[in-house]
Structures are given as C-alpha cells and as structure tokens.
Image (cartoon, grey):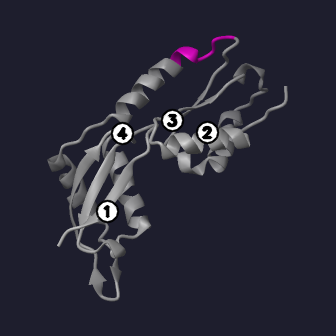
Amino acid sequence: MQKTGVTAQDAKIAGEAHEAGKGIIIVVNKWDEIEKDDKTIEKYKKDVYDKLSYLSYAPILFISAKTGQRVNKLYEMINMVASQNALKVSTAVLNDILNEAVTIVQPPTDKGKRLKVLYMTQAQTKPPTFVVFVNDKDLFHFSYERYLVNQIRKEFGGLVGTPVRIIVREKE
C-alpha cells in the first residue's frame, strides 16, 4: 500500500477545526499496512507536524480500523482532549502563573517603553481563552503571547489537543 500522508484536504479540515477552537486528535489509520522499523513512528510524526505545524499541541494516534489496533485508545484520548478543551482556571491561579512567567521572562520594551502585564482572567472555555490586560497593546509582541501560552500549557499538563487563545486588552 502506498502511503498518502497529510493531504491538502486534511490540512484544510484541520485548519478549520483549529480556527474554530475545537479539540484535535490526529489519527493515522491503516497503520497495520505500513512496514515499520524503530524510526517509523518518529518519521511519520515529523512529517505530520511539518505539514500541520500549527497543530503542534495535537496528539497523534496510529490505529488500524481493520484490525482494531489501538482503536480503544482513541476513545480514551477523545475524553482527555474534551476535558482539556473545557478547562476552567480561576483568576487567582492564572495570575500566579502570570506573575511567575513575567518574573522569568521580562515583558518586551520598545523605544524605552516597557510592556506592563497587569493581570489575566479566563474569558471562556472550548477552547480555553484568556484575556491579558496590559498598559499598551502595541508592545505585546506575538512571541511574548506564545511564551505565555507555553507557560499556561506547562502548568496544566500541556492542554493536549486543544488550542489556547489569548486576547490582549489595554487597561489604563
């Protein structure tokens, strides 16, 4: 059997699910038909994440619908991703995480003006969406947003399979 890999249609559907904030599990079927060695899984994972780099948070599961191989793990993973996608965090806990993150990596400056990250609260679940209040939105660089998302993921076991959104608001 010829391996297809990630198709353009797969990427389009995955992109729509990501944009909609849905929990995502990447499932590779027909795993029983692939000739494998000790590097096969890592090679396939790298190929998938190269093509779907924006889904680095999504777990990959290799199954065979025909033989039933690992299909039972899919249901466990669906339940786990659904609970991660519905995660609710108190403002106090979020601000502890935020304060620690800001202490480790200082917010950026631009032309002598420093970004002040004031506090964070959760606006919604499915996907977890956090509002960060700052002194100047223009100083909030996407790399600092990515850093904060990574800190939140680290604190809550990776938030596997779910996108994490950050909304930045100015507060005087």
Q: Amino acid at mark 1?
A: Val
Ranked by sequence position, the earlier of labels 3 and 4 is: 3
C-alpha gap between disc 2 and disc 1? 28 Å
The residue that disc 1 covers is: 168
Q: Amino acid at mark 4?
A: Gly
Ranked by sequence position, the earlier of labels 4 and 1 is: 4
Q: Secondary structure at mark 1?
A: strand
Horizontal side of 118 relative to 114 (left or right) equals left
Q: Residues within 10 Å of mark 1 (few under 14, many from 20)?
A: some
* First to last magenta residue range: 67-73
Ranked by sequence position, the earlier of labels 2 and 1 is: 2
Query: Residue lying farthest top?
Result: 67
Q: Looking at the figure, which quarter contains the N terminus?
A: top right
Q: Residue at x 56, y 43 (%)?
A: 16
The residue that disc 3 covers is: 24
Q: Is residue 26 above or below residue 69?
A: below
Q: Secondary structure at mark 4?
A: loop
Q: Would you say residue 72 sits in the magenta stretch? A: yes
- Say which mark, if any, is on residue 63: none
Q: Residues within 10 Å of mark 4 (few under 14, many from 20)?
A: few
The residue that disc 2 covers is: 13
The x and y percentages for residue 14 are 59, 40
- Say which mark, if any, is on residue 157: 4
Q: Amino acid at mark 3?
A: Ile
